[in-house]
Image (tube, helix red, strand yellow):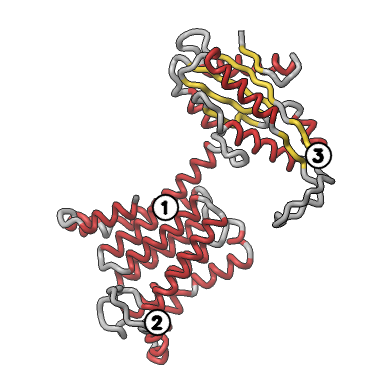
Amino acid sequence: MLLLGATVILQSASLRETVAAFAPVYPWVIFGVGLLLGWRFKRRQLVVSLIVLFAAERALVTFSPDAGPSSIGRIVFAAIALLLPLDLAALAWLTERSLSAWTGRVVLGLILGEPLAIALLMRPELAHVTQALQHVFVPLGVSLKLPQPALLVFLAAIVLATMRFVLRPTVIQSSLAWTLIAVFLGLNGDNPASTVYLTTGGLVLVISLIETSHRMAFSDELTGLPSRRALTAALMRLPELYTAAMIDIDHFKKLNDEHGHAAGDQVLRLIGSTLTRTEGGGRPFRYGGEEFAVLFPGKSSEEALPYLEDLRETIEASTFIVRGRNRPKVRPEKPLRSTRGQRRVAITVSIGVAEPEASGADPEDVIRAADQALYKAKRAGRNRVFVAE
């Protein structure tokens, strides 16, 4: 949407003067804010990506590529068009941890050495290298500003960034792939289009940083459900009539002790996945540990009870298989029929339900009432639903 918006603005004749006036300020604002946020949240991958983009944008503004093929501006443009997609693709395949390893240090060292390499390309004895960077392999019917070697590198970089996103589908990886597309559009345009597109690519990275931080704060990494902080925020937006249900996995500590925490994590994911299919408008949350919460806005406890009973029965009917220690890391093409080393474990939950006793009741009091009903369900034998009195 950001790239589409930038394209529409650049193509609008009525906005052209505004864009020309705003373009010199745009990168300083976006990259400045992005670098501060990246430093604050300790996201070195995005900080380095923003620095590379900002340096490329400043170099393109300083050295105009519109002169002849042997001009300094054209040499700088050809080098940036070749190196920038490689930098972004390499950064897409790195992680915060690998940046501190030798592979990350090598990549960072190469990126730091690129200004020197570009300066060396301007020497007369390396004229054959600069000519190779602008070599035309096949005449194209489409007019592109990018040299053909850079075009091939761009295609490879976009493929690599997309592959990385497929293997690790995160917001950061997605933003790096879209940033590559923004850079491609920017390098094929004149000023102020190149500045607008490259800076919009930086804006994509900044927004991905904000979105990632929001997800870390309001989403549970293990189950994918909204976290307790998200539950607290949701409680403040509930209507006068609602129902809160607290759900706890029965004998979870025993399962952890017998089968290990890895099996416990698998059970939590299973319950989280089941809760996402709660009907009746129920909104699930990870409360903490083996405890979950479900909110039913606009429903009384009597109306929500059938959906919670269905949920309890669904979990009871599901069977969790604890894998043996010799389970292969890679799934075989033909699954083995032997069940040796595997054990089926029945999973059940206890549920406590409560609704506000009066208009304007504190939502935290409703949660506590549901929690008390939950422990009554456990004392009554577990695997049942209790409604607070």
Kindly report the distance in space between the C-alpha atoms of the residues bearing marks 2 and 3: 62 Å
Element under disc 3: strand
Q: Going from the N terminus, do you reach mark 3 or mark 1 first?
A: 1
Question: Type of residue at label 1?
Answer: Gly
The numbered disc on residue 34 is 1
Image quadrant assignment for residue 256: top right
Q: Going from the N terminus, do you reach mark 2 or mark 3 first?
A: 2
Q: Going from the N terminus, do you reach mark 2 or mark 1 first?
A: 1
Residue nearer the viewer, 349 or 191:
349
Element under disc 1: helix
The numbered disc on residue 7 is none
Dot 3: within a 10 Å radius of its alpha carbon, few (fewer than 14), some, or many (20 or more) residues?
Answer: some
Residue nearer the viewer, 356 or 269:
269
Element under disc 2: helix
Dot 1: within a 10 Å radius of its alpha carbon, few (fewer than 14), some, or many (20 or more) residues?
Answer: many
Question: Type of residue at label 3?
Answer: Arg
Which numbered mark, 2 or 3, is in the foreground of this view?
A: 3
Which numbered mark, 3 or 1, is in the foreground of this view?
A: 3
Q: Looking at the picture, how far across and down is residue 228, in whole percent? A: 57, 30
Question: Residue shown at 46%/61% (left/top)?
Answer: 49
Residue on which disc 3 sits: 343
Q: Looking at the picture, how far across and down is residue 373, in whole percent? A: 65, 14
Which numbered mark, 2 or 1, is in the foreground of this view?
A: 2
Question: Type of residue at label 2?
Answer: Leu
Q: Looking at the picture, how far across and down is residue 253, in whole percent? A: 77, 31
The numbered disc on residue 133 is 2
